[in-house]
Image (spheres, grey):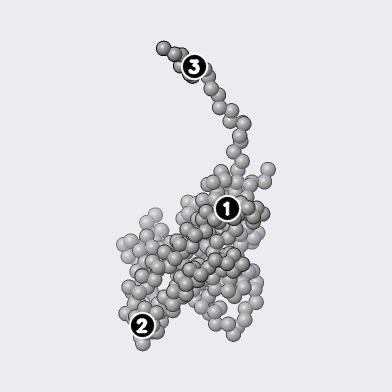
Amino acid sequence: MIADGVRLSLAEIEIAHLVGLIDDFTEVLVTLDDESDPAFARLTPDVYPDDAAASAEFSAATRDDLLDRRAAEAATVRRGLVASSAAEAASIPDNGLEMRDVVIRMSELDAWLRTLTALRLVIASRLGMTTDDDQRDPGDSRYAVYDWLGIRLDGVIALADDLDEGLG
Amino acid sequence: MSAPIIEPGVEESLDLYAAPLEPWQVVVWNDPVNLMSYVVRVFRTYFGYSRDHATTLMLAVHHDGHAIVATGPRETMEVHAQAMHDFGLWATVRKAPQ
């Protein structure tokens, strides 16, 4: 723990993968305009599922800003990752197993939590995960990425909760 | 001098019963993605709920499929729903059942 934030320990290879996923995510956000896309529907849910007109009005007023915030927060996370890495951005480093401390300032914590969550939401929607009991295809490596993001997100949540306790 | 348009001393009354404030609700729905620890943290940090209350709401989402996390004026509930969407939670707004 540091004075105004937390340190997240990540291997160089994890940083490289996370930067790559964030770049993919940012690309998805730019091209995301199809309401039938499950990732789009999940990132910007219908607020009035029984009232299409009210839902459309709400989403017209808020959806672009919501997606802009996702992009801005993803950029914040990317900056933190790149600053902590000795490797070139998005390249697979030679020293992949070396651990780095990624500093997350308190003011950036929500950006981290929301970005890691959004990445998992997009992967889950691409995999068609809709219930707690979905069967997994063991040959699909995206499940491994999804689970790894979940472990890292859980770690950031624990660090953030500890930080709150320390302040309380 | 002309007489004032509005006569002083005329009592105006505001009939609070004329337009009752209908309560609306924010409902958060279960999904297979969001971590329990995350949902508790969102309820705790965004709404300012105690850890116990936030945990109770999270468990209701998990076991019952949904939970009412806030009740109040429609505009306020829309702001809360938007915040839940920012956190990646699946939230909807509805009129509170009478």
Amino acid type assigned to the residue bearing label 3 in the image = Glu
Neighbours of disc 2 within 10 Å: few (<14), some (14-19), many (20+): some
Q: Distance between the residues labelled 2 and 1?
A: 50 Å
- How far from the left and from the top, in percent, is residue B9? 49, 16
Residue under pointer 1: A57
Q: Which quarter of the figure has residue B15?
A: top right
Instruction: Report the residue that reaches farthest toward the right.
Output: B98
Q: Which quarter of the figure has residue B23?
A: top right
Q: Distance between the residues labelled 2 and 3?
A: 82 Å
Disc 1 is placed on an element classified as helix
In front: label 2 or label 1? 1
Amino acid type assigned to the residue bearing label 2 in the image = Glu
- How far from the left and from the top, in percent, is residue B60? 61, 57
The answer to whether one can see residue B84 in this image is no
Query: Is residue A2 left or right of A16 when viewed as pictured?
Result: left
Instruction: Report the residue that reaches farthest toward the front.
Output: B1
- How far from the left and from the top, in percent, is residue A94? 36, 87
Residue under pointer 3: B7
Disc 2: host chain? A
Disc 3 is placed on an element classified as loop
Residue under pointer 2: A98
Q: Which residue is drawn at 43% across and 67% down?
A: A74
Disc 1: host chain? A
The relative height of residue B19 versus residue A142 in the rendered view (above or below) is above
Q: Residue at x 37, y 60 (%)?
A: A107
- How far from the left and from the top, in percent, is residue A101? 35, 74
> What is the number of the mark on residue B52?
none
Same chain, marks 2 and 1? yes
